[in-house]
Image (tube, grey):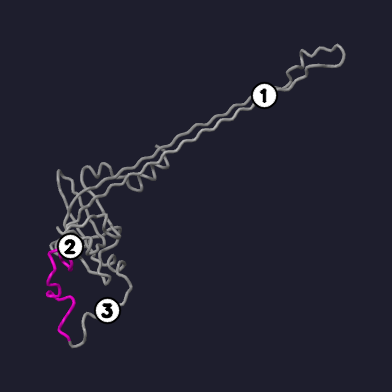
Amino acid sequence: MLRKHWLAGLIIIFLPVPFALGKAKKIQREDLAAYIQRMQPQVPELPSGSPGSLWTDNGRLAFLTGDFKAGRVGDLITIVVVHDTTANNANSVSTARTLAASSGITALAGKLKTGGVQELFSPNSSQALTGKSQASTTSSLQTTLSGRVMAVLSSDLLVIEAERQLTMNNENQTILVRGLVRRGDIGPDNTVASNAMGDLELELKGKGVLSDGTRPPNIVVRTLLRIIGF
């Protein structure tokens, strides 16, 4: 009886492993199939050939003068990621206000003296405000990685995706790039710049000692810190 329970426990533990290995890559909680479906333009598909003809537009011999540049599903392509973003914002404000008033009596009828009533009311007020604010943000990412053509849309745009995983010093780093590319933007050396890709989605994430040290606390700890105040 104990042996049966032990075997059942092992089956339950190792059952989710195949599903975890086959899990689809996602960017912003969207898998590749949903991305292609969203990017597919809603245009009617034209027939690839005339009835009764052996010619097909997607055949291997359709482009006899073609080169080695990516153009079909499964072809390799090199993506040159050059991402530089700089934003600066500076503001300043300065205000000043001064108020002064004087009220008194300098003369009275007859020979009455005015020494005690010359200064009846004399208010003075001064207010000044000076403030400055400055914000600066700079981000830079430069790398080169190879990907594949995942789909060819009806508008002749290529859907490309590239992924690279790097493990060094107990730190895992994964970069995932996805976007749309025109055939004319692919260079003679089969490379395309990231700033020439449409609907670009770029994800860079790490997991390890450094990432754990800079990762924000969980929601329970954040709630306690908000309540306690330090």
Whole-angstrom CA distance, mark 2 to mark 1, is 79 Å
Which disc, if any, is residue 170?
none
Residue 76 lies, with reference to residue 43, above or below; the image says: above
Task: For mark 3, give the secondary structure.
Answer: loop
- The residue identified by callout 1 is 123
10 Å crowding of disc 1: few (<14), some (14-19), many (20+): few
Q: Is residue 196 magenta?
A: no
Would residue 189 be found to the left or right of residue 112 on screen?
left
The residue most toward the bottom is: 52
Q: Residues within 10 Å of mark 3 (few under 14, many from 20)?
A: few
From the viewer's perspective, tell me whether residue 87 is left or right of residue 213.
right
| Lower position in the chain sequence, tag 2 or tag 1 | 1
**Residue drawn at point x = 16 percent, y = 45 percent:** 170
Residue 197: horizontal and vertical position, in percent? Answer: 26, 59
Name which quarter of the figure residue 76 lies in. bottom left
The residue at which mark 2 appears reads as 148
Q: In terms of sequence position, does the residue under pointer 2 or pointer 3 come before the other? A: 3
Between the residue at mark 2 and the residue at mark 3, the CA separation in whole angstroms equals: 26 Å
Magenta residues, start to end? 53-76
Between 115 and 71, the residue placed more toward the observer is 71
Q: Amino acid at mark 3?
A: Leu
The correct choice, above or below, for 220 with respect to 108 in the image is below
Name the residue carrying label 3: 46
| Badge 1 amino acid | Pro
Q: Main secondary structure of the magenta part?
A: loop
Residue drawn at (78%, 19%), measured in percent from left and top? Answer: 105
Front of the two marks 2 and 3: 3
| Disc 2: CA contacts within 10 A as few (<14), some (14-19) or many (>=20) | many
Q: Which residue is at 30% across, 58% downward?
A: 28
